Image (cartoon, rainbow, N blue to C red):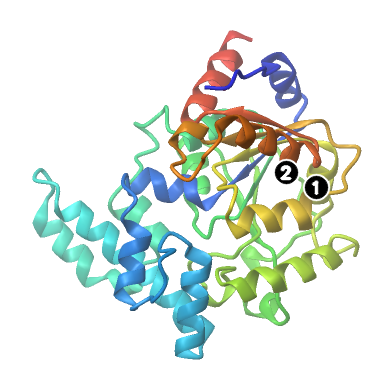
Amino acid sequence: MPTNNVDWYFIIDQIHQKKCTPVISNQIIIESLFSDDSLMPAWADSINYPLTDQYNLTRIAQFLSVTQQDPVRAKSNYLHFLKRSLLNLAQQNSEANQNFLSLVRNELRSLTFSQLATERLYLPNFKEELDHPLSILAALDVPIYLTTSHHTFIEAALRAVGKTPRTEVYAWQEGMEDNLPAEFKTNLNFDPEVQTPLVYHWHGLDAYPDSLVLTEDDHLEFLVNVTQDLQEPGVIPSSVRNALSSSLLLLLGYDLHAWDLRVMLQGLIKGKPRRPRSFAIQIIPESQASIKSLEHFQEYLHKYFGQVRFDVYWGDVQSFMQTLWAEWEAG
C-alpha cells in the first residue's frame, strides 16, 4: 500500500480555526447501509438496463430517463428502489420486529429514503455508532458541510451530537428555487457556527425528486449553471464560496471515475489558488480490480489531484476519520 504522508497537526489546526470543510459524497451513505456491491446491478436489472457497466449510477439513470422520456419518473424510480431495498434488507434480519416492519412498509410511499433510514430503522444509529464517519464529522468543530448526497444523514448525525443544522439546497436548474420550501432556500444572512452548522446540498434532496442531480444530462446542466452562479453575488452563500476558495477541503468517499467527483473538481474546486492544499481520501489501489499497473495508477492519481491542489490519502474513509479523531482528541 502506498505511504501516507499526512500533516495531521495542520488539519487539526485548520479545524480549530474553522477553516476545514468536509465535502461528503453520497457513496459514504449508501455503502454504510448496503455492505455489498449488488445494489446498482439490482436496480439496473429491474429496469432492463442493456449495458454491462451496471455500477454506473449516472448512466443507468440516464438510460431510464430517456426510455421513460421523463427524468422525474426516473429519479422517483431510483428513490423508491432504494427504499424497497433497505426495507427488504431490514426484514432479512432474524432479530428484527417483523410486525413493526410491516407497518413501516405500509407507509413506505409517504416516507423519504432519509426518513425511512434515520427515523424508522435507525440506520445508521448515530447515537450508538460513534465511530461512523458521519458521527466523527459531526463531533468536530466544523461550521459548514458540503455534500453531493441527496439525503439528510449528515443532519441526523449532527442532531445526534446536540447540534442544530440548517439545510440548504443549491437551485441548480431554472425554476427550482420556486419549488423549494422556504426552509431549504438560500439564506444569505445565515452565519454558520459549530453548534448551528450549514449543510449545503449541491445535488438536491430526496424529498423533492425533481431536484436531484442524477443523470448525465443533470450533471452537465449543473456544471454550466454552478460555474456561472459562483461568479454571481447573491446566489450561493458567501460562506460556501469562501469555504471552497480558502479552506482546507476533505473530499470523502468519491469514486475517481464517477460524474459527481469530476463535476465537483471542474465546477467548484478547480482554479482556487488561495485554498490550502487539501486531501482526497481514495480507496486503496489494490482493491481496484481494473488496475493493471499499481505504480502507474498511483502516479496518475497524484498528478490528477495534484493539479487541483489535493494530496491523496490512500485508504478508506473509515480509517482516515478514525485517525483524524484520535489526533483531534490528542489535541
Residue at the front extreme, as displayed: 292
The residue tagged 1 is 239
- Image quarter (top left, top right, bottom left or bottom right) of the C terminus: top right
Residue located 75% across and 18% down the image = 10
Rendering quarter of residue 2:
top right
The image's mark for residue 192 is 2
Tell me: 69 left or right of 40. right
Q: Residues within 10 Å of mark 2 (few under 14, many from 20)?
A: some
Residue at (65, 43) in percent of width and height? 197
What is the three-letter code of the residue carrying label 2? Pro
Tell me the residue at 52%/76% (across/down).
62
Which three-letter amino acid code belongs to the residue tagged 1?
Ser
Q: Secondary structure at mark 2?
A: loop
Q: Nearer the viewer, residue 13 or 1?
A: 1
Is any atom of residue 165 visible in this view?
Answer: yes
Please determine whether, in this image, residue 282 is positioned above or below residue 63.
above
Near-viewer residue (302 or 81): 302
Q: Who comes first in sequence, dot 2 or dot 1? A: 2
Separation (CA) of disc 2 from disc 1: 8 Å
